[in-house]
Image: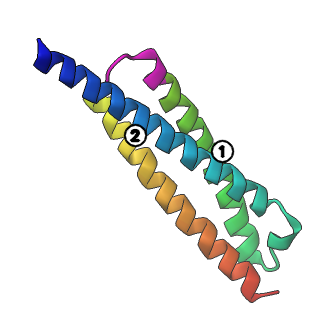
């Protein structure tokens, strides 16, 4: 009985930790999206315009995936393998998107 309670407690803690991490990542992406739309990040060559368009699409896709995963996590009491894999992929997408925006910011600052 105690072992089962520990497993449930650990699972609940893990879900809460992931929710917090995903929320923090989402806030970072929102701030980066705002920065992307600011005048300081205006594209100044065809390559930058394309990068900016792709980033905006990636932000929309990320936000949609974030919303879907958060809804699934709140609907389910525990964590299943499929949801855990979705979350890991989403966290990897966050890292990739962070790198893409950093590359874009570097390319726009080099041309200013």
Please report the residue visible at 51 percent of the width from the left and 29 percent of the height from the top.
70
The local secondary structure at tag 2 comes to helix
Q: Mark 2 and mark 1: span between their CA atoms?
A: 17 Å
Please report the residue visible at 84 percent of the width from the left and 63 percent of the height from the top.
38
Please report the residue visible at 47 percent of the width from the left and 53 percent of the height from the top.
93
Q: Quadrant of the N terminus?
A: top left
Q: Is residue 49 above or below residue 11?
A: below
Judge from the rendering whether residue 43 lies leftward or rightward of residue 5; answer left or right.
Answer: right
Packing grade of label 1 (10 A; few <14, some 14-19, many >=20) is few
Q: Quadrant of the C terminus?
A: bottom right
Packing grade of label 2 (10 A; few <14, some 14-19, many >=20) is many
Query: Which comes sooner in the sequence, label 2 or label 1?
Result: 1
Q: Is residue 109 above or below residue 82?
A: below
Judge from the rendering whether residue 24 lies leftward or rightward of residue 80; answer left or right.
Answer: right
**Can residue 80 be seen?**
no
Residue 45, position as x, y percentages in the image: 79, 80
What's the mark number on residue 28?
Answer: none
Residue 37, position as x, y percentages in the image: 81, 59
What's the mark number on residue 87?
Answer: 2
Residue to which mark 1 is pinned: 60
Between label 2 and label 1, give the one nearer the viewer: 2
| In magenta segment, residue 15 | no
The local secondary structure at tag 1 comes to helix
Magenta-colored span: 72-80
Residue 52, position as x, y percentages in the image: 72, 64
Q: Tell me the quarter of the picture where residue 53 sits.
A: bottom right
Q: Tell me the quarter of the picture where residue 36 sits.
A: bottom right
Please report the residue visible at 63 percent of the width from the left and 52 percent of the height from the top.
29
Residue 76, position as x, y percentages in the image: 39, 17
Q: Tell me the quarter of the picture where residue 62 sits.
A: top right
Colour option used: rainbow
């Amino acid at each position: 009985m105690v072992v089962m309670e520990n497993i449930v407690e650990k699972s609940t803690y893990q879900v809460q930790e992931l929710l917090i991490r995903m929320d923090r990542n989402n806030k970072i992406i929102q701030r980066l999206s705002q920065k992307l739309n600011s005048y300081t990040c205006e594209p100044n060559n065809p390559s930058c315009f394309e990068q900016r368009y792709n980033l905006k699409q990636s932000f929309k896709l990320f936000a949609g995936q974030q919303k879907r995963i958060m809804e699934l996590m709140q609907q389910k009491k525990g964590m299943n393998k499929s949801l855990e894999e979705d979350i890991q992929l989403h966290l990897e997408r966050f890292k990739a998107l962070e790198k893409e925006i950093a590359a874009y910011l570097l390319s726009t600052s080099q041309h200013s």
